[in-house]
Image: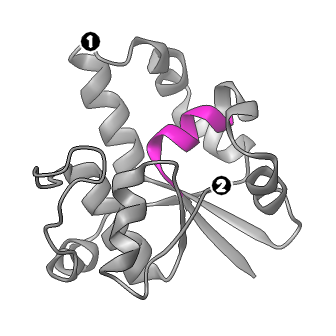
Amino acid sequence: MNQFLLDTHVLHWFDTNSKQIPSKIRTQLTQADAQIYASSINAWEMQIKNQLGNWADVTEFLSKYHERILEYQMRDLAFSSAHALELKAVPSIERADRPGQIHRDPFDRALIAQALHENLVLVSSDVNIQAYRAHLPKLKVIWD
């Protein structure tokens, strides 16, 4: 069975414009044996960024978040204390998109911890998340 955890932007694209997700990834996500997880971290990130005025186009999705997750047959993955403790395994690394700066995004780090703890494949186009593969051999990230 293939088990996937969606990065927040991928969850949003899944709902609004699946064409932004590469066809190879869409095929994997729609296989009969695919199990897709949406994390409470996704909702948290969208809600915070939306309230700050930085992500206005998630408002409609957030208003029907649970209904949409069920509609897409995704599993709602709560962020637990076990996931929080898994963060000890997630090192501070240099940003792939801004050399010389440390990657500190709490949403990305939380999703990485969940993927590690639950042994899920993280689906993300984020180069900073993908960069963690070099430091975390057990982390599985797919995009292209």
Can you identify the residue that label 2 sits on? Answer: 74
Q: Viewer-proximal residue, 137 or 101? A: 101
Q: Residue at x 76, y 58 (%)?
A: 29
Q: Residue at x 65, y 55 (%)?
A: 74
Check disc 2 and give the amino acid type: Met
Point out the frontmost of discs 1 and 2: 1
Task: Give percent across and percent down for residue 19.
Answer: 76, 32
Task: Give percent across and percent down for residue 92.
Answer: 13, 68
What numbered label is drawn on residue 53? 1
Q: Viewer-proximal residue, 25 or 80? A: 25
Task: Report helix, strand or loop for mark 1.
Answer: loop
Task: Give percent across and percent down for residue 56.
Answer: 40, 12
Task: Report helix, strand or loop for mark 2.
Answer: loop
Judged left or right of residue 18, residue 67 is left
Position of the N terminus, as image quadrant, is: bottom right
Query: Label 2: how many residues lie within 10 Å, few (<14), some (14-19) or many (20+)?
Result: some
- Bounds of the magenta segment: 6-14
Position of the C terminus, as image quadrant, is: bottom right
Check disc 1 and give the amino acid type: Gly
Query: What distance separates the C-alpha of mark 1 from that of mark 2?
Result: 27 Å
